Image: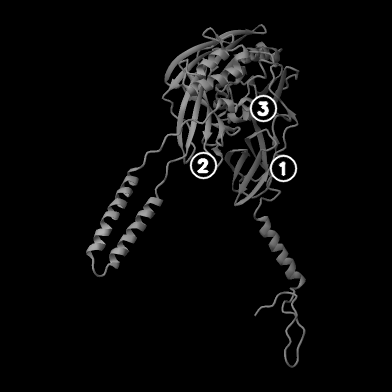
Amino acid sequence: MMACIGARPRERRGRHHNRPLFIAPPLTQRALIALFGVLILASSSLSAQQIDHERTRYLGDGRGRPGCYAPLEIVFAGKAGGTATVEILSPGVALRRQVSVNAAGPVTARVPCRVAADSKIRVTLDGASDEFSPEVPARLMAPSYHRIYAAAFAPEAANLPASDTLVFDAFKTDECFADWRMFDGYDAIVLLNPGDGRLPAGAQRALLEFASLGGAVFIAGNFTLESGLPALPDPTTIDFAGVPVLRQSCGGGTLYRVAYERIAEKPADVLVAAMRRHQWYGGSEAPAGAPATRGAENPPPTQYLEVGDRRAAAPSLMVYGLVGLIALTCLLAPLALDRLKRGAWPAFAATALIAVGIAIAGANQSGPLPQVQVSVLELASDGDITARREVWLVPPAVKDVFTVDLANSRLLPRAGKPVTGWRVYTVDLPLTRAIAQRAPVAKFENAYIEGLPFRDFAARARVGETALDETGARLVDWWLEVNAYRGRKAQIVKVGEIEPLAAWPGTETVIRGGLAIIEPR
Protein backbone atom coordinates (compact mmCIF):
# COMPACT_ATOMS: atom_id res chain seq x y z
CA MET A 1 0.00 0.00 0.00
CA MET A 2 1.44 3.33 -1.15
CA ALA A 3 0.99 6.60 0.65
CA CYS A 4 0.67 9.92 -1.08
CA ILE A 5 2.96 12.84 -0.43
CA GLY A 6 1.87 14.85 2.65
CA ALA A 7 -0.19 11.98 4.24
CA ARG A 8 -0.02 11.35 7.99
CA PRO A 9 2.65 8.74 8.78
CA ARG A 10 1.54 5.33 10.00
CA GLU A 11 2.06 4.49 13.69
CA ARG A 12 4.11 1.42 14.55
CA ARG A 13 4.23 -0.53 17.82
CA GLY A 14 7.23 -0.10 20.02
CA ARG A 15 9.65 2.53 19.00
CA HIS A 16 8.34 4.67 16.20
CA HIS A 17 9.62 7.60 14.22
CA ASN A 18 7.61 10.23 12.40
CA ARG A 19 9.50 9.79 9.16
CA PRO A 20 7.82 10.69 5.89
CA LEU A 21 7.68 7.98 3.27
CA PHE A 22 9.09 10.39 0.66
CA ILE A 23 12.58 11.71 1.21
CA ALA A 24 13.53 14.81 -0.76
CA PRO A 25 16.69 14.34 -2.81
CA PRO A 26 19.74 16.44 -2.06
CA LEU A 27 20.17 19.76 -3.81
CA THR A 28 22.57 18.30 -6.39
CA GLN A 29 20.10 15.60 -7.39
CA ARG A 30 17.29 18.12 -7.75
CA ALA A 31 19.46 20.27 -9.96
CA LEU A 32 20.25 17.30 -12.21
CA ILE A 33 16.57 16.38 -12.46
CA ALA A 34 15.67 19.97 -13.41
CA LEU A 35 18.42 20.05 -16.03
CA PHE A 36 17.22 16.77 -17.49
CA GLY A 37 13.69 18.17 -17.76
CA VAL A 38 14.93 21.29 -19.52
CA LEU A 39 16.85 19.16 -22.03
CA ILE A 40 13.74 17.10 -22.75
CA LEU A 41 11.71 20.25 -23.41
CA ALA A 42 14.42 21.75 -25.59
CA SER A 43 14.64 18.62 -27.72
CA SER A 44 11.16 19.31 -29.15
CA SER A 45 12.17 22.64 -30.74
CA LEU A 46 15.16 24.00 -32.55
CA SER A 47 17.62 26.00 -30.51
CA ALA A 48 17.12 29.72 -30.80
CA GLN A 49 20.70 29.87 -32.03
CA GLN A 50 19.92 27.56 -34.96
CA ILE A 51 17.74 30.14 -36.78
CA ASP A 52 18.93 33.73 -36.73
CA HIS A 53 15.54 35.44 -36.61
CA GLU A 54 17.10 38.91 -36.60
CA ARG A 55 18.85 38.33 -39.95
CA THR A 56 16.07 36.27 -41.53
CA ARG A 57 14.20 38.73 -43.73
CA TYR A 58 12.59 39.49 -47.05
CA LEU A 59 15.12 40.69 -49.59
CA GLY A 60 14.43 43.79 -51.61
CA ASP A 61 15.28 46.93 -49.64
CA GLY A 62 12.30 46.56 -47.32
CA ARG A 63 9.74 46.34 -50.15
CA GLY A 64 7.23 43.71 -51.20
CA ARG A 65 3.95 43.33 -53.06
CA PRO A 66 1.06 42.21 -50.85
CA GLY A 67 -0.36 38.79 -51.70
CA CYS A 68 2.52 37.92 -54.02
CA TYR A 69 5.59 35.82 -53.30
CA ALA A 70 8.94 37.47 -52.63
CA PRO A 71 12.48 36.20 -51.86
CA LEU A 72 12.96 35.42 -48.17
CA GLU A 73 16.46 34.74 -46.84
CA ILE A 74 16.61 32.31 -43.89
CA VAL A 75 19.86 32.35 -41.89
CA PHE A 76 20.97 29.20 -40.06
CA ALA A 77 23.38 30.33 -37.38
CA GLY A 78 23.83 27.11 -35.35
CA LYS A 79 26.71 24.68 -35.67
CA ALA A 80 24.64 21.51 -35.93
CA GLY A 81 24.85 19.85 -39.36
CA GLY A 82 22.34 17.86 -41.36
CA THR A 83 19.52 18.52 -43.79
CA ALA A 84 16.74 20.88 -42.77
CA THR A 85 13.22 20.78 -44.17
CA VAL A 86 11.90 24.29 -44.77
CA GLU A 87 8.13 24.71 -45.18
CA ILE A 88 6.66 28.00 -46.36
CA LEU A 89 3.08 28.06 -45.08
CA SER A 90 0.17 30.26 -46.12
CA PRO A 91 -3.57 29.52 -45.86
CA GLY A 92 -4.23 26.29 -47.78
CA VAL A 93 -0.72 26.11 -49.31
CA ALA A 94 2.60 24.62 -48.20
CA LEU A 95 5.82 24.99 -50.21
CA ARG A 96 8.64 22.66 -49.16
CA ARG A 97 12.39 22.59 -49.73
CA GLN A 98 15.39 20.66 -48.34
CA VAL A 99 18.41 22.73 -47.21
CA SER A 100 21.84 21.35 -46.35
CA VAL A 101 23.28 23.03 -43.23
CA ASN A 102 26.58 21.16 -43.06
CA ALA A 103 28.78 24.20 -43.60
CA ALA A 104 31.07 25.27 -40.76
CA GLY A 105 29.73 28.82 -40.60
CA PRO A 106 26.29 30.38 -41.03
CA VAL A 107 24.17 29.00 -43.89
CA THR A 108 21.61 31.03 -45.84
CA ALA A 109 18.69 29.71 -47.86
CA ARG A 110 16.48 31.78 -50.14
CA VAL A 111 12.90 30.66 -50.62
CA PRO A 112 9.73 32.24 -52.03
CA CYS A 113 7.39 33.42 -49.28
CA ARG A 114 4.01 35.12 -49.61
CA VAL A 115 4.01 38.72 -48.42
CA ALA A 116 1.27 38.59 -45.80
CA ALA A 117 0.93 38.66 -42.03
CA ASP A 118 -0.45 35.10 -41.95
CA SER A 119 2.57 33.55 -43.71
CA LYS A 120 4.72 31.26 -41.59
CA ILE A 121 8.01 29.40 -41.85
CA ARG A 122 8.51 25.99 -40.28
CA VAL A 123 12.04 24.56 -40.14
CA THR A 124 12.59 20.94 -39.09
CA LEU A 125 16.06 19.53 -38.39
CA ASP A 126 16.81 16.16 -36.75
CA GLY A 127 13.25 15.85 -35.48
CA ALA A 128 13.22 19.30 -33.87
CA SER A 129 11.28 22.21 -35.35
CA ASP A 130 10.96 25.97 -35.21
CA GLU A 131 7.95 27.88 -36.55
CA PHE A 132 7.82 31.66 -36.91
CA SER A 133 6.25 34.45 -38.97
CA PRO A 134 8.71 36.61 -40.94
CA GLU A 135 8.32 40.34 -40.52
CA VAL A 136 6.29 41.85 -43.35
CA PRO A 137 8.22 44.44 -45.42
CA ALA A 138 7.65 47.99 -44.26
CA ARG A 139 7.05 49.39 -47.76
CA LEU A 140 4.23 47.53 -49.54
CA MET A 141 4.17 48.08 -53.30
CA ALA A 142 0.57 48.02 -54.51
CA PRO A 143 0.05 47.51 -58.28
CA SER A 144 0.08 50.82 -60.15
CA TYR A 145 0.33 52.01 -63.75
CA HIS A 146 2.16 55.09 -62.51
CA ARG A 147 4.91 53.27 -60.61
CA ILE A 148 6.78 50.23 -61.94
CA TYR A 149 8.24 47.84 -59.40
CA ALA A 150 11.32 46.03 -60.75
CA ALA A 151 14.27 43.91 -59.64
CA ALA A 152 17.59 45.02 -61.16
CA PHE A 153 20.65 42.75 -61.45
CA ALA A 154 24.10 44.09 -62.35
CA PRO A 155 27.77 43.01 -61.85
CA GLU A 156 27.79 45.47 -58.97
CA ALA A 157 24.53 46.23 -57.20
CA ALA A 158 22.67 48.51 -59.60
CA ASN A 159 22.66 52.14 -58.49
CA LEU A 160 19.69 53.44 -60.43
CA PRO A 161 17.94 56.69 -59.61
CA ALA A 162 14.65 56.16 -57.80
CA SER A 163 11.63 58.10 -59.01
CA ASP A 164 7.88 58.22 -58.69
CA THR A 165 7.52 56.11 -61.85
CA LEU A 166 10.22 53.46 -61.28
CA VAL A 167 11.29 51.67 -58.09
CA PHE A 168 14.16 49.15 -58.08
CA ASP A 169 15.31 46.43 -55.72
CA ALA A 170 19.04 46.15 -56.46
CA PHE A 171 20.97 42.85 -56.59
CA LYS A 172 24.25 41.59 -58.02
CA THR A 173 24.16 39.49 -61.16
CA ASP A 174 25.39 36.36 -59.37
CA GLU A 175 22.43 36.73 -56.95
CA CYS A 176 19.84 36.26 -59.69
CA PHE A 177 17.18 33.81 -58.51
CA ALA A 178 16.88 30.31 -59.98
CA ASP A 179 13.23 30.03 -58.90
CA TRP A 180 10.71 32.14 -60.83
CA ARG A 181 8.42 32.23 -57.79
CA MET A 182 10.81 34.72 -56.15
CA PHE A 183 10.13 37.12 -59.06
CA ASP A 184 6.37 36.81 -58.53
CA GLY A 185 5.70 40.27 -57.08
CA TYR A 186 7.71 42.29 -59.63
CA ASP A 187 6.40 44.01 -62.75
CA ALA A 188 9.75 43.63 -64.52
CA ILE A 189 13.20 42.06 -64.17
CA VAL A 190 16.16 44.11 -65.41
CA LEU A 191 19.61 42.75 -66.29
CA LEU A 192 22.16 45.53 -66.74
CA ASN A 193 25.40 44.82 -68.63
CA PRO A 194 25.28 41.05 -68.06
CA GLY A 195 28.30 40.42 -70.29
CA ASP A 196 28.28 36.75 -71.25
CA GLY A 197 25.23 36.16 -69.10
CA ARG A 198 27.07 34.65 -66.14
CA LEU A 199 23.96 33.93 -64.16
CA PRO A 200 23.55 31.20 -61.54
CA ALA A 201 22.43 27.80 -62.80
CA GLY A 202 18.72 27.80 -63.51
CA ALA A 203 18.37 31.60 -63.53
CA GLN A 204 17.79 31.85 -67.28
CA ARG A 205 14.93 29.34 -67.14
CA ALA A 206 13.47 31.22 -64.16
CA LEU A 207 13.50 34.46 -66.18
CA LEU A 208 11.69 32.82 -69.11
CA GLU A 209 9.17 31.26 -66.73
CA PHE A 210 8.46 34.64 -65.17
CA ALA A 211 7.99 36.17 -68.63
CA SER A 212 5.73 33.37 -69.87
CA LEU A 213 3.22 34.20 -67.13
CA GLY A 214 2.95 37.82 -68.25
CA GLY A 215 6.12 39.40 -66.88
CA ALA A 216 8.63 41.61 -68.68
CA VAL A 217 12.38 40.91 -68.76
CA PHE A 218 14.57 43.85 -69.86
CA ILE A 219 18.16 42.94 -70.86
CA ALA A 220 20.73 45.69 -71.46
CA GLY A 221 23.95 44.14 -72.75
CA ASN A 222 25.17 41.00 -74.52
CA PHE A 223 23.12 37.96 -73.60
CA THR A 224 22.71 34.50 -75.10
CA LEU A 225 20.17 31.94 -73.95
CA GLU A 226 21.75 28.64 -72.96
CA SER A 227 20.90 25.42 -74.75
CA GLY A 228 17.95 23.37 -73.60
CA LEU A 229 15.60 26.34 -73.18
CA PRO A 230 12.57 26.89 -75.43
CA ALA A 231 13.35 28.84 -78.58
CA LEU A 232 11.95 32.37 -78.75
CA PRO A 233 10.40 33.80 -81.94
CA ASP A 234 12.34 36.21 -84.12
CA PRO A 235 12.58 39.69 -82.59
CA THR A 236 10.95 42.85 -83.80
CA THR A 237 12.39 46.35 -83.31
CA ILE A 238 10.47 49.04 -81.42
CA ASP A 239 11.60 52.57 -80.63
CA PHE A 240 11.38 53.53 -76.94
CA ALA A 241 12.45 57.05 -75.90
CA GLY A 242 14.50 57.36 -79.10
CA VAL A 243 16.34 54.04 -78.56
CA PRO A 244 15.73 50.97 -80.80
CA VAL A 245 14.90 47.94 -78.66
CA LEU A 246 14.49 44.31 -79.77
CA ARG A 247 11.29 42.70 -78.53
CA GLN A 248 10.60 38.94 -78.32
CA SER A 249 7.35 37.47 -77.06
CA CYS A 250 7.46 34.70 -74.47
CA GLY A 251 4.09 33.18 -73.65
CA GLY A 252 2.02 35.88 -72.01
CA GLY A 253 5.05 38.17 -71.49
CA THR A 254 7.98 39.78 -73.27
CA LEU A 255 11.79 39.93 -73.43
CA TYR A 256 13.34 43.28 -74.39
CA ARG A 257 16.99 43.54 -75.48
CA VAL A 258 19.13 46.59 -76.08
CA ALA A 259 22.83 47.44 -76.16
CA TYR A 260 23.90 48.72 -72.75
CA GLU A 261 25.75 51.66 -74.30
CA ARG A 262 22.52 52.91 -75.87
CA ILE A 263 20.72 53.32 -72.54
CA ALA A 264 23.62 53.99 -70.15
CA GLU A 265 22.57 57.62 -69.76
CA LYS A 266 18.81 57.08 -69.44
CA PRO A 267 17.96 53.48 -68.56
CA ALA A 268 14.88 54.46 -66.57
CA ASP A 269 13.32 56.40 -69.48
CA VAL A 270 13.64 53.47 -71.87
CA LEU A 271 12.39 50.95 -69.33
CA VAL A 272 9.35 53.02 -68.39
CA ALA A 273 8.42 53.46 -72.07
CA ALA A 274 8.77 49.70 -72.67
CA MET A 275 6.66 48.88 -69.64
CA ARG A 276 3.95 51.29 -70.72
CA ARG A 277 3.59 49.28 -73.89
CA HIS A 278 3.88 45.97 -72.09
CA GLN A 279 1.13 46.80 -69.60
CA TRP A 280 -1.07 48.48 -72.20
CA TYR A 281 -1.12 51.56 -70.02
CA GLY A 282 -4.52 52.62 -68.69
CA GLY A 283 -5.95 54.71 -65.91
CA SER A 284 -6.02 53.29 -62.40
CA GLU A 285 -9.45 54.78 -61.76
CA ALA A 286 -12.75 53.20 -62.83
CA PRO A 287 -13.59 51.53 -65.08
CA ALA A 288 -10.07 50.26 -65.82
CA GLY A 289 -8.94 49.57 -62.25
CA ALA A 290 -5.48 48.62 -61.06
CA PRO A 291 -3.10 46.83 -63.45
CA ALA A 292 -2.95 43.07 -63.52
CA THR A 293 -0.94 41.24 -60.89
CA ARG A 294 -0.94 37.55 -60.08
CA GLY A 295 -1.44 38.01 -56.35
CA ALA A 296 -4.28 40.56 -56.44
CA GLU A 297 -6.60 39.33 -59.18
CA ASN A 298 -6.34 35.59 -58.58
CA PRO A 299 -8.22 33.44 -57.81
CA PRO A 300 -11.23 34.83 -59.70
CA PRO A 301 -14.22 36.08 -57.72
CA THR A 302 -16.67 33.41 -56.72
CA GLN A 303 -19.39 34.71 -59.07
CA TYR A 304 -17.35 33.35 -61.98
CA LEU A 305 -17.06 29.87 -60.45
CA GLU A 306 -19.52 27.05 -60.00
CA VAL A 307 -19.04 23.42 -59.06
CA GLY A 308 -19.75 21.27 -62.11
CA ASP A 309 -21.55 17.94 -62.32
CA ARG A 310 -19.64 15.13 -60.65
CA ARG A 311 -19.23 11.95 -62.65
CA ALA A 312 -20.23 8.74 -60.93
CA ALA A 313 -17.28 6.42 -60.43
CA ALA A 314 -17.72 3.04 -62.15
CA PRO A 315 -17.62 0.00 -59.82
CA SER A 316 -14.53 -2.16 -60.11
CA LEU A 317 -14.56 -5.83 -61.14
CA MET A 318 -13.90 -6.76 -57.52
CA VAL A 319 -17.18 -5.12 -56.48
CA TYR A 320 -19.10 -7.22 -59.01
CA GLY A 321 -17.31 -10.33 -57.75
CA LEU A 322 -18.21 -9.60 -54.13
CA VAL A 323 -21.87 -9.07 -55.03
CA GLY A 324 -21.93 -12.40 -56.85
CA LEU A 325 -20.28 -14.18 -53.91
CA ILE A 326 -22.84 -12.77 -51.47
CA ALA A 327 -25.69 -13.97 -53.70
CA LEU A 328 -24.14 -17.42 -54.03
CA THR A 329 -23.63 -17.73 -50.26
CA CYS A 330 -27.20 -16.71 -49.51
CA LEU A 331 -28.45 -19.31 -52.01
CA LEU A 332 -26.34 -22.28 -50.95
CA ALA A 333 -26.30 -21.82 -47.16
CA PRO A 334 -30.04 -22.65 -46.63
CA LEU A 335 -29.75 -25.71 -48.87
CA ALA A 336 -26.76 -27.01 -46.93
CA LEU A 337 -28.48 -26.49 -43.59
CA ASP A 338 -31.60 -28.21 -44.81
CA ARG A 339 -29.72 -31.35 -45.84
CA LEU A 340 -27.69 -31.65 -42.65
CA LYS A 341 -29.80 -33.36 -39.96
CA ARG A 342 -26.99 -33.78 -37.54
CA GLY A 343 -23.92 -31.76 -36.89
CA ALA A 344 -25.36 -28.62 -38.51
CA TRP A 345 -23.00 -26.35 -36.62
CA PRO A 346 -20.12 -26.79 -39.15
CA ALA A 347 -22.35 -25.39 -41.86
CA PHE A 348 -23.33 -22.46 -39.63
CA ALA A 349 -19.67 -21.80 -38.88
CA ALA A 350 -18.68 -22.04 -42.53
CA THR A 351 -21.43 -19.59 -43.51
CA ALA A 352 -20.32 -17.15 -40.79
CA LEU A 353 -16.67 -17.36 -41.91
CA ILE A 354 -17.62 -16.76 -45.53
CA ALA A 355 -19.67 -13.71 -44.54
CA VAL A 356 -16.80 -12.31 -42.48
CA GLY A 357 -14.40 -12.85 -45.38
CA ILE A 358 -16.71 -11.03 -47.78
CA ALA A 359 -17.06 -8.16 -45.30
CA ILE A 360 -13.27 -7.85 -44.92
CA ALA A 361 -12.76 -7.90 -48.69
CA GLY A 362 -15.45 -5.28 -49.15
CA ALA A 363 -13.96 -3.03 -46.47
CA ASN A 364 -10.60 -3.12 -48.24
CA GLN A 365 -12.06 -1.91 -51.52
CA SER A 366 -11.24 1.72 -52.25
CA GLY A 367 -14.24 3.86 -52.97
CA PRO A 368 -14.43 6.48 -55.72
CA LEU A 369 -11.65 9.05 -55.50
CA PRO A 370 -12.55 12.66 -54.70
CA GLN A 371 -12.72 14.68 -57.90
CA VAL A 372 -10.73 17.89 -58.33
CA GLN A 373 -12.34 20.01 -61.07
CA VAL A 374 -9.91 22.01 -63.19
CA SER A 375 -10.58 24.87 -65.63
CA VAL A 376 -7.67 25.91 -67.86
CA LEU A 377 -6.75 29.39 -69.13
CA GLU A 378 -3.80 29.31 -71.53
CA LEU A 379 -1.74 32.49 -71.96
CA ALA A 380 0.06 32.97 -75.26
CA SER A 381 1.37 35.57 -77.69
CA ASP A 382 3.55 35.12 -80.79
CA GLY A 383 5.48 31.87 -81.05
CA ASP A 384 4.98 28.48 -79.42
CA ILE A 385 5.73 29.30 -75.77
CA THR A 386 2.67 29.34 -73.52
CA ALA A 387 1.81 29.29 -69.83
CA ARG A 388 -1.24 28.11 -67.93
CA ARG A 389 -3.35 29.60 -65.22
CA GLU A 390 -5.66 26.91 -63.89
CA VAL A 391 -8.59 27.19 -61.47
CA TRP A 392 -8.90 24.16 -59.21
CA LEU A 393 -12.05 23.32 -57.23
CA VAL A 394 -11.13 20.91 -54.42
CA PRO A 395 -13.98 18.99 -52.70
CA PRO A 396 -14.57 19.16 -48.94
CA ALA A 397 -13.53 15.49 -48.59
CA VAL A 398 -9.91 16.51 -49.26
CA LYS A 399 -8.63 17.87 -45.96
CA ASP A 400 -4.90 18.35 -46.56
CA VAL A 401 -3.32 21.50 -47.96
CA PHE A 402 -1.87 22.04 -51.44
CA THR A 403 1.76 20.95 -50.97
CA VAL A 404 4.48 21.72 -53.53
CA ASP A 405 8.05 20.39 -53.52
CA LEU A 406 10.05 23.39 -54.79
CA ALA A 407 12.86 21.16 -56.07
CA ASN A 408 10.63 18.99 -58.28
CA SER A 409 7.78 21.26 -59.34
CA ARG A 410 7.62 24.69 -60.95
CA LEU A 411 3.96 25.46 -60.26
CA LEU A 412 2.62 27.95 -57.73
CA PRO A 413 -0.84 27.63 -56.13
CA ARG A 414 -2.83 30.41 -54.44
CA ALA A 415 -5.87 29.82 -52.27
CA GLY A 416 -9.10 31.79 -52.65
CA LYS A 417 -12.53 31.96 -51.06
CA PRO A 418 -14.45 28.65 -50.92
CA VAL A 419 -17.41 28.01 -53.25
CA THR A 420 -20.27 26.07 -51.63
CA GLY A 421 -17.78 24.39 -49.34
CA TRP A 422 -15.27 23.60 -52.09
CA ARG A 423 -11.82 25.13 -51.82
CA VAL A 424 -10.61 27.29 -54.72
CA TYR A 425 -7.04 27.52 -55.96
CA THR A 426 -5.47 29.35 -58.87
CA VAL A 427 -2.40 27.46 -60.07
CA ASP A 428 0.26 29.09 -62.27
CA LEU A 429 2.31 26.78 -64.51
CA PRO A 430 5.01 28.48 -66.63
CA LEU A 431 6.59 27.38 -69.92
CA THR A 432 3.96 24.87 -70.95
CA ARG A 433 3.34 23.35 -74.36
CA ALA A 434 0.52 24.81 -76.40
CA ILE A 435 -2.69 22.77 -76.31
CA ALA A 436 -2.97 21.17 -79.74
CA GLN A 437 -6.73 21.20 -80.32
CA ARG A 438 -7.82 24.78 -81.01
CA ALA A 439 -10.91 26.43 -82.44
CA PRO A 440 -10.90 30.25 -82.82
CA VAL A 441 -14.00 31.84 -81.32
CA ALA A 442 -13.71 35.63 -81.59
CA LYS A 443 -11.39 38.63 -81.67
CA PHE A 444 -11.38 41.24 -78.93
CA GLU A 445 -10.40 44.86 -79.67
CA ASN A 446 -11.41 48.25 -78.27
CA ALA A 447 -13.74 46.60 -75.71
CA TYR A 448 -15.74 44.97 -78.51
CA ILE A 449 -16.04 41.34 -79.58
CA GLU A 450 -17.52 40.50 -82.97
CA GLY A 451 -19.22 43.89 -83.09
CA LEU A 452 -20.72 43.56 -79.60
CA PRO A 453 -19.74 45.33 -76.38
CA PHE A 454 -17.74 42.80 -74.40
CA ARG A 455 -20.37 42.45 -71.66
CA ASP A 456 -23.07 41.71 -74.25
CA PHE A 457 -20.84 39.00 -75.71
CA ALA A 458 -20.21 37.57 -72.23
CA ALA A 459 -23.96 37.53 -71.51
CA ARG A 460 -24.65 35.66 -74.73
CA ALA A 461 -21.86 33.20 -73.96
CA ARG A 462 -23.38 32.42 -70.55
CA VAL A 463 -26.72 31.44 -72.14
CA GLY A 464 -25.10 29.28 -74.83
CA GLU A 465 -25.41 31.62 -77.83
CA THR A 466 -21.71 31.42 -78.76
CA ALA A 467 -19.30 28.59 -79.56
CA LEU A 468 -18.10 28.53 -75.94
CA ASP A 469 -19.26 25.91 -73.46
CA GLU A 470 -20.23 26.79 -69.87
CA THR A 471 -16.65 26.68 -68.58
CA GLY A 472 -15.33 28.75 -71.49
CA ALA A 473 -18.10 31.30 -70.97
CA ARG A 474 -17.18 31.76 -67.31
CA LEU A 475 -13.46 32.03 -68.09
CA VAL A 476 -13.94 34.62 -70.84
CA ASP A 477 -16.34 36.60 -68.61
CA TRP A 478 -13.70 36.73 -65.88
CA TRP A 479 -10.86 37.65 -68.28
CA LEU A 480 -12.89 40.40 -69.92
CA GLU A 481 -13.85 42.00 -66.62
CA VAL A 482 -10.17 42.15 -65.65
CA ASN A 483 -8.70 43.27 -68.99
CA ALA A 484 -11.33 44.86 -71.22
CA TYR A 485 -10.66 48.47 -70.18
CA ARG A 486 -6.88 48.21 -70.48
CA GLY A 487 -6.71 48.69 -74.23
CA ARG A 488 -5.73 45.09 -74.93
CA LYS A 489 -6.17 43.18 -78.16
CA ALA A 490 -6.66 39.45 -78.02
CA GLN A 491 -7.88 36.42 -79.89
CA ILE A 492 -10.14 34.10 -77.91
CA VAL A 493 -9.64 30.43 -78.75
CA LYS A 494 -11.49 27.38 -77.47
CA VAL A 495 -9.17 24.47 -76.64
CA GLY A 496 -9.92 20.79 -76.18
CA GLU A 497 -8.32 17.46 -75.31
CA ILE A 498 -6.49 19.07 -72.41
CA GLU A 499 -4.00 16.96 -70.51
CA PRO A 500 -3.62 17.78 -66.80
CA LEU A 501 -0.11 18.99 -66.00
CA ALA A 502 -0.38 18.36 -62.26
CA ALA A 503 -2.58 16.34 -59.92
CA TRP A 504 -3.55 16.35 -56.27
CA PRO A 505 -2.40 13.05 -54.70
CA GLY A 506 -5.24 10.65 -53.91
CA THR A 507 -7.76 12.42 -56.15
CA GLU A 508 -9.11 12.22 -59.68
CA THR A 509 -8.54 15.23 -61.93
CA VAL A 510 -11.54 16.23 -64.03
CA ILE A 511 -10.84 18.81 -66.78
CA ARG A 512 -13.99 20.92 -67.14
CA GLY A 513 -12.77 22.84 -70.17
CA GLY A 514 -10.39 25.53 -71.26
CA LEU A 515 -9.72 28.71 -73.14
CA ALA A 516 -6.65 30.23 -74.78
CA ILE A 517 -6.07 33.99 -74.76
CA ILE A 518 -3.60 35.02 -77.48
CA GLU A 519 -2.42 38.60 -76.99
CA PRO A 520 -0.22 40.01 -79.74
CA ARG A 521 1.94 42.78 -78.25
Residue at (73%, 20%) from the top-left corner? Answer: 160
Horizontal side of 143 relative to 305 (left or right) equals right
Q: What x and y, as percent, mark residue 74?
A: 66, 39
Q: Which disc number belongs to residue 397?
A: 2
Q: Position of residue 59 (x, y in %)?
A: 69, 32
Earlier in the chain: of badge 2 and badge 1, it is 1
Q: Tell me: residue 415, above or below residue 473.
A: below
| Circle 3 SS class | strand
Label 1 belongs to which residue? Answer: 53
Q: Quick one: label 3, few (<14), some, or many (20+) residues within 10 Å? A: some
**134 in relation to 267, above or below:** below
User: Which residue shows up at 58% across the image and 11% down it?
Assistant: 246
Compare marks 3 and 2 and give the one earlier in the sequence: 3
Position of 461 relative to 23 (above/below): above
**Disc 3: which residue:** 172
- Three-letter code, disc 1: His
> Comparing marks 3 and 2, which lies closer to the viewer?
2
**Neighbourhood count class around disc 1 (C-alpha, 10 Å): few under 14, some 14–19, many 20 upward:** some
- Give the Cα separation between the discs numbered 1 and 3: 24 Å
